[in-house]
Each structure stands twice: as C-alpha cells, then as structure tokens.
Image (cartoon, rainbow, N blue to C red):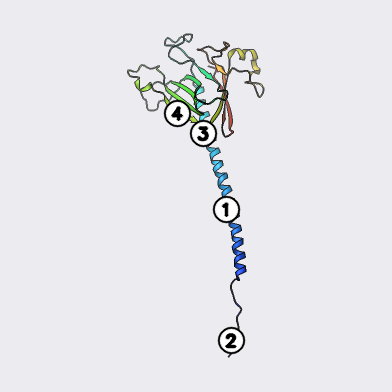
Amino acid sequence: MSRVARPQTGFTLIEVVIALAITAVIMTFSYQSFSTASRSAEASAQVLARINELDRTWQILGQDARHILTPVNASGDASVIGGVRRPFRGASLYGDTSGDKLVLQFTRGGWLNPMNRPRSDMQQVIYRIEDGTLWRDFRPERNFVVEDWLYAEDLIRQPMLEQVTDIDVRFLSPQMAQQQGAGVLNGEDYARDWVQNWPDSSGAGVDTSLPLAMLVRIELEDGLVSERLYDLAQ
C-alpha cells in the first residue's frame, strides 16, 4: 500500500531571514522613537522644573515687595540714618554674576508667626548673587524687646535660583514720576530711563527713601528671560 506524500509545512530559511530583518528594522525605529520621546520628556521636565523654580522666586520676591518698609530710626524719625531698619538698596549686575554681589537690601514687615515664637514680625532681607546663584538671606529685625537676640544674629541663607546670567533692576524715582506724569508706564521700554542703582548717585534717591516702583529682569543660562514690575509706593 503506497503512502500519499503530504506537503511540507513551516517556513523556509529565506522567509525566516526576511522576517527577522523586518523585525530588526521595526525594533530599530521603535527604539529611536522611544529614545527621542524619552529625551523630549526629560527636556520638558527640566524646563518645567526651571519655570517652577523661577515662579517660586517671583512669588517670594512679590511677597517681600508688598511688605517693604520705609527705613526709620529707633525714635521713628525717617530722616535719620542708622536706626532700626536698614535703608533700601538695589543694584543691577550688568551681566557680571561672578563673586558675591548685592542685588537688593531692605526691611519688610508682615512676617507671619503661626508658632508664636519670640521673634520680630519684621525681617532684614538681602537678595544677592554668588557665582551665578541667587540667594535670599534674612533674619528677624529688632523691633520687639527680647532679652536674648543671639539666636537671630546669623542670617538664614535660602537658595532661590541657579544659573543666573544677569539681573537688571530699575527703579522709578519720585522725581521722574513727577516729570513724566501719567505717561510714566507708556511704551514697551518704559523703564529705559529708570535708575539702575538705589540710592541713585545723581541724587534721585536718599537712604531713607523708597522708589515708587521697581522692575526686576532675570536672565538664565538656558535662555529663560522673565521680568516683573512691583509697586513700592507706600
């Protein structure tokens, strides 16, 4: 009795090789797409983190600006220097973020004390640049009678923003506001002629005075540029 030959099933070697080649191509494209997506996600996360860091800086600076106090001495006379509150000072960096440089110095009020600790409700605040990093240094001001203030002598140093390439600070003096009147904020470059240091060497500001407004512009290494305008009129 003869047997009927059955057709062979399965894949030939050529078919297997072609299938493997197609699979390899698909995997290569898939890996490249995944790698690109992963790098894009990582870059987006870094940008988002920088934006959040910058936004946090603006929020804290905004809180400080809303509570800046006019300098006065122990007797309450604002015309005398060297009293309780530090004079308001500010300076642009002009693109130089090396070393340790002062950006802003002032006394602020409204410092919340939910734990009811024996401290002042005012702060001495300093914003400064140290080798490209923006710091906020602060400590309680001595407007309350406290027996022992040794714990408050050292400044608390708070890092705010890294990789800063420039901070441009401009101040609106009462004299300029009076000269320009209602048009003081007109135009895109309205702060071009505002002074970049306070007190101004030309006499626009004195140690016990505050500018009417302050424009702060921050530039970062990764290309982010942001600015805020603060109303300091008391």
Q: Earlier in the sequence, mark 1 or mark 4?
A: 1
Residue 44 place in picture, x, y as percent: 56, 41
Q: Earlier in the sequence, mark 3 or mark 4?
A: 3
Label 4: state its secondary structure.
strand
Q: Which residue is mark 2?
A: 3
Q: For marks 3 and 1, give the one nearer the viewer.
A: 1
Residue at 38% in and 17% down: 144
Q: CA distance from mark 4 to mark 2?
A: 91 Å
* Residue type, mark 2 in image: Arg
> x and y percent of residue 127 in the render?
49, 24
- Please tell me whether residue 214 is drawn above or below residue 44 in the rendered image: above
Q: Residues within 10 Å of mark 3 (few under 14, many from 20)?
A: some
4 and 2 marks in contact (CB < 8 Å): no
Instruction: Tell me the SS state at disc 2.
Output: loop
Residue 179 vertical placement versus 2 (above, below): above
Residue at left 59%, top 59%? 24
Of callouts 2 and 1, the N-terminal one:
2
Name the image quarter holding residue 228: top right
Q: Which residue is mark 1?
A: 31
* Circle nearer the viewer, 2 or 3: 2
Residue ID at (65%, 23%): 189
Gap in Å between the C-alphas at discs 2 and 3?
82 Å
Tag of residue 158:
4
Instruction: Identify the secondary structure beneath mark 3.
Output: helix
Name the foreground residue: 101 vs 196: 101
Mark 1 or mark 4, which is nearer to you? 1
Cα separation, mark 3 vs mark 1, equals 32 Å
Residue placed under numbered mark 3 in the picture:
53
Mark 4 closeness class: few <14, some 14–19, many ≥20 residues within 10 Å: few
Residue at 49% x, 20% y: name it. Answer: 105
